[in-house]
Every structure is written in structure tokens, then in C-alpha cells.
Amino acid sequence: MIKGLRSGRESAYDQLFKEFYQPLSVFANSYVHDLETAKEIVQDLFVHLYEKRKTLVITTSIKSYLYQSVRNRCLNQIKHQQVQKMHHDRMKPEQNFSENLEDKIRETELEHMIFKVVDQLPPQCRRIFNMSRVSGLSNGEIAEQLEISKRTVETQISNALKVLREKLDY
Amino acid sequence: MKPKKDFEEHLFNNLGTFQSIDIEEDWQKVRGRIGYEKSRRLNPARAFPVALLRGKRAPLKIRNGSKIPRSSASRIFNPVWRTAAAVILLLGVGFLAQKYLDLTPDMIAVQSGDQMKEVLLPDGSSVTLNKQTKLIYPEKFRRRQRELKLIGEAFFEVVSNPALPFIVDVDQRALIRVLGTSFNISTNESGESISVQVIEGRVAFSSSLDRSDEIILVKDEQATLTEGSVIRDDTVDRNFLSWKTGKLIFDHENIAEVFRQLQAHYEIEIVLHKSVHEELSFTSTLDNQDMESVLDEISMVLGLEYSYEDEKVIFSLPE
């Protein structure tokens, strides 16, 4: 992939972006607590990566390279904002940055896999699961909104969890 | 990983966030920027550092030019050599100590200048001197032991001979005796401490003044002499041989430490602008790369820009 990148092949670059854009954005969001900022940081990284593709020597795995870059850029951003004293309410300056990066990357990847599996669920199942886990509705509320039985809701959610467990070997 | 009773609920916390990120839409944004940036990049900025870089790069070429040939490096790790040779890296500072080194008539002094230098000892052992290093050894080793003196930094391949101990005197401060096959010795840049790292075999390490505090080190162990006493270290500095191998390994290393090691390696001052977060970290294996590609990689990973100012490299936040 790095070779493909170096030669400027758009497909290689495209692939890299599609594979990592979402998890990196979520990961960045955990630092900057603002999704738009997080996404911009990741986009900047990809633009920079493309610009430097010819001279760049990446000796670690592309994954740890990307995550580490994002983390550093987030810290830069936080520092920058602290200096500017903007969006101060959104920032947590007391945040501890000596976190275990490996663990954090692993967790982001797991969340990404969960997202991908949920995305593949049958529409009705996915909808119910999202209402439950994303919107935080109770099974009763979901049943009411969709005009189905509470039992169906429970079955669909447990089906979703079963698929997740199987696919993720969790 | 064994199946658990249920998913920890917090793993779903970001599910909504994932769903709200539109890859296609943002990919178009990035593509657009690349095209835009590309045409804008044909700007004079491209030309700026060339002259400067040349100047900076020149000493690196010297460094590369003086590098030990690959065959020699691989020979060290050849198993046959391993059993026959002890590998020692010595680093001592103290130009003050120079005056204490008595040169008896049969002594040979070798001084490396701006380049590394290889020396073949009378017993067949060989020594690679780092730049600005002095080695003093007898034309013929004595019958009881092989004694050498060192000021500076060196890498030894010692022919093993249990009947003839191999002893290195560093600055008249530390004594390193080869007991088994192979090991390493080094110091911090201020010259206050001298460290020994053992690759394999056994090594005895003590201060010159007090042999009673001698420490025996085996494989993957390190000890340091500071203020006259030798203390066992918990961890081994993984880049201790970088001056010779050209290889630097960083594993989530704090950026200040990375810069410290790069400075020593590339002989150029590298600083972080004060506006930059000091907890940035860097992971990479740099294998004989030229300085420019290393700086590019760092600027990429850190999301910073670098510039040359007063013989220094400064990393700062992008505009």
C-alpha cells in the first residue's frame, strides 16, 4: 500500500482513506471533543500524507503511523486552542495524555468493527438496535414508536448482539 | 480472547459518531484539496531549503562514507564469530584523563579524527573507533592479560581467550573485564556516567578505584557507573549501538528524547518551538536514513512544520 501511495496511485490512497477515515475521526474526537474539528484534523493528515508521499519513509505499520499522527495533531490542536483561549468550554486541559495508546487504538478498532457489523444487519434489526444503543430508547419506547411488540424488539436486539458476538469473536 | 458475558456498553458509545461520518463526502473534500494543493505546490517554497540542506547534509555524507561495510556488521552477528569474539562498545569522555595515560615505549596510540576508524589489535581482535576517539594499546600484549585504554567511544570485536583476560580501562574510571563472549559499553554525553550493555556472555564491570563493587552482567543486562559506584539498570537503552549501525528505534518515545538521540546521531541541534505540546510521541525504526527524510517523517507524524534557523532545526505548529 505504501508503494502504491508513493507512486501516487489514487486507488491506493482512496483505499487508505476509506479504511481509516472513520476510526481515525472517532479517535481524534476522543481528544478534541468536537467531531468537525476531529474530521478536519484527519483530512489534513491525509492531504499532508499525499503531498509527502514521494519523500516519506514509513518504517512502522501504516496503522500505528496514522493513529500516532492523529494523536499528535490533536495535541497540537488542543495546545493551539488553549493558547487562543477559544472553545475553552469544550476542551479538557486537565486531560491525561500519558494514556496507553495501544489500548486506545485497539478500542477504537473494536468500535469500528462493531459499527461495520451493525451496518450490515438487516434494516429492521439495525434500526431497532440503533434506537436502543445509539438513541438510548428503552425497549418499551421502541416498541411504541415502531408499533411492534416489545418481545419483537427484545428478539431483534438479542439477534443483533448474537451476530456481533459471532462476527467479532467477542 | 474468550467470549465474555456481554458487550461492555461503552463500546457502543461511538456507534452514532461512526454513523454520522460520511466517508464519500469527506473523501471528495480531500481529493479536491489535493488537486488544489498540488498546483499550489509549484511554489518557491519548494526551492528554499535546497542550498541550506546541501550544507547540512554534507557532514552526513562523511558519516555514511565512513560507515562500516555491511559485511563487517553481519560478520559480527555470524554465529561463528559470536563464539569467537566479544563485542564491546566503550564510551568514555574526559579529555582531562588524557594526561594520566602513560605511554610506555611499546604502546601504540590511535586517534580517529572526523571519521570512524578500524584498528586491528595484535591478538586479532578489532576495534571500531567512533569519531574523536583515542585508543592506546601495546604493540604486543603481555603474557597475563590484554590491557587497553580508551578515551571516547568504540566498538570492540574481541577474540575470546579465557587464558588471557581482555581488560579495558575507560578514563581510569571504569574497568571492563571480558569474562565470556560478547557485550557492550557506553556513556552519557556529559561523560558523567559509563554504561555497560551485555549482548551475550559475561562481563565484569567495576570502578577503577574500587574493584570490590564489581558487578557481573549477563545477556540483556546493563549497569551504569555514576559518581564512582556501579549500579544495575532496570532497562537497556535500545539505541546504544546506533552510532555504528545507523539504526534508531523509537517506541512511543517522548519527542524530547527522540530529539536528544537524533541530535547526537545527525550532529545537528533540533528544537521544539515552545508553542508545541511537549507530550508528543514518536514511533519508528530509522534505518540509516538521511536526515531530511527523518525530519519529513517526524513533521508528518507530529503534524508540525520544520525550518532551519541558525544551524538549528526548529519544529513548530503549522501556520
Image: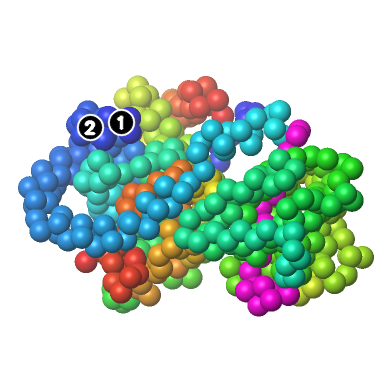
- Quarter containing the C terminus of chain B: bottom left
Check the image and name the residue furthest to the front.
B105
Kind of element beneath mark 1: helix
Residue B216 rendering spot, x and y as whole percentages: 85, 53
- Quarter containing the N terminus of chain B: top right
Please tell me which residue is depicted at 20% across the width and 34% down the height of the picture.
Answer: A8
Please tell me which residue is depicted at 79% across the width and 40% down the height of the picture.
Answer: B160
Residue B99 position (above or below residue A95):
below
Residue A34 position (above or below residue B269):
above
Nearest the viewer among B301 and A7 is A7
Q: Can residue B96 be found in the magenta stretch?
A: yes
User: In the displayed structure, does residue B258 sit left or right of residue A70?
Assistant: right
The chain holding disc 2 is: A
Residue contact at pointers 1 and 2, CB within 8 angstroms: yes
- Which disc, if any, is residue A3? 1
Please tell me which residue is depicted at 15% across the width and 41% down the height of the picture.
Answer: B31
Residue type indicated by callout 2: Ser
Is residue A141 among the parts visible in the rendering? no
Residue A7 rendering spot, x and y as whole percentages: 22, 32
Residue at the disc numbered 2: A7
Marks 1 and 2 sit apart, C-alpha to C-alpha, by 6 Å
Nearest the viewer among B249 and B265 is B265
Q: Can residue B40 be found in the magenta stretch?
A: no
Kind of element beneath mark 2: loop
Q: What stretch is highlighted in magenta?
A: B83-100
Q: How many marks?
A: 2
Residue type indicated by callout 1: Lys
